[in-house]
Amino acid sequence: MMPQMSGYEVTAKLRKNFTLIDLPILMLTAKTQLQDKIIAFEAGANDYLAKPCNREELLTRVHTLVQLSRLNNELKRVNLILEDKVKQRTEQLETANEHLEKIIDSRTHLLANIAHDLGTPVTVIQNYLQAIHSGIIEDDEREHYLQLAYSKIKILNRLITDLFDLSKLEAQQFQFNFRQLTVCDWIAHLQEKFELELIQSKRQFTFQTIPIATNITSYLDEQRLEQAFSNLLWNAVDHTLQGTGEIHVSVTVDEEKSEIKFSFTDNGRGIDDKVIPFIFDRYYRVKKLPEEHRGTGVGLAIVKEIVQAHHGTVWAESTLNAGSTFYITLPIQINE
Ligand code: ADP
């Protein structure tokens, strides 16, 4: 009975923009014929009530329709959250998949290279020995050739140790033996060890530490951490030159964060920004390195595994042709 536009037309217009669930419409009309009801539903009404109507009945029907609409909104909200979760999960899976593909790829690459990396030094050693044996080499040259053979054996030894560690890492048989240590004693011991270890490297080595209070301890596996530090130090040696190479270790303590921080800095060849995110991956190694610097790409993966087992963090910063710094943080306890 409205002027200009009937209730049916209003309903039909509203339905162009709103669905039955988004905007429920209840028609209140004096018309009571079956045909009228059909027209109302066809126009898009959700419900229909004839005038005069009972107040309670009207309120109950309105209440039901409002409830329905609210429920629908809630469902939409849950649906959006779910969609978001599915999207996030899919992205995570895609990243994990890419990561796995990269590892499989470098692994295939590594296996193809192992035969070459192990085979070349063996052939060289064999040739030296044969030459010495058959007297081709003069007495005064013998020492030089023995040194060459020795350096090749060292390369072989490192490769074999890395591969052995790798197989344990893969089988998750890496055993840890944690102990509570007084940090200042441990650092003094590390300094001595590093200095001794690096004497033969002919690199300039410096070690700097702040004074550390005697009530600071840490729960750690000394041997495993030495292995991690040693990997970083020998990488620094490998990527610097004899004579000009400088390696600097620094130790600081952040009492507020309850952590000790080590930095291993070298002035060597550096690492390209683009590959830094991958250097801690198993089997990853920078391509096109000279043969004597080619490892198995396992050293830093082992470092990461050891540091993470200590609930610590490890990361690297580097500038190509200027040098690299590797950082390690480990948790400490400050005792009363
Ligand atoms: P690898 O045993 O092959 O050296 P790592 O896992 O120790 O493998 O290192 C991964 C890659 O990171 C190597 O290919 C190496 O070139 C690069 N890298 C590691 N440490 C340094 C460093 N101090 N300076 C330059 N490059 C480095």
Image (tube, rainbow, N blue to C red):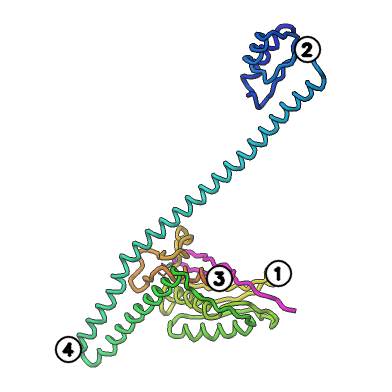
Q: Is residue 121 above or below residue 93?
A: below
Residue 60 in picture, x, y percent from top left: 77, 25
Is residue 6 rendered to the left or right of residue 188?
right
**Rounded to the nearest whole Å, what is the CA distance between mark 4 and mark 2?**
121 Å
Callouts 2 and 3 close, C-beta under 8 Å? no
Q: Which disc, if any, is residue 134? A: 4
Q: Residues within 10 Å of mark 3 (few under 14, many from 20)?
A: few
Q: Earlier in the sequence, mark 1 or mark 4?
A: 4
**Amino acid beneath label 2:** Lys
Q: Earlier in the sequence, mark 2 or mark 3?
A: 2
Is residue 165 rendered to the left or right of residue 50?
left
Residues shaded magenta: 311-336
Please tell me which residue lies in front, 275 or 73. Answer: 73
* Residue assigned mark 2: 51
Q: Earlier in the sequence, mark 4 or mark 2?
A: 2
**Amino acid beneath label 1:** Glu
Residue 194: in sight, yes or no? yes
Q: Quadrant of the N terminus?
A: top right
**Amino acid beneath label 4:** Ser
* Residue assigned mark 1: 256
Q: Name the front one of labels 4 and 2.
A: 2
Residue 129 in picture, x, y percent from top left: 23, 86
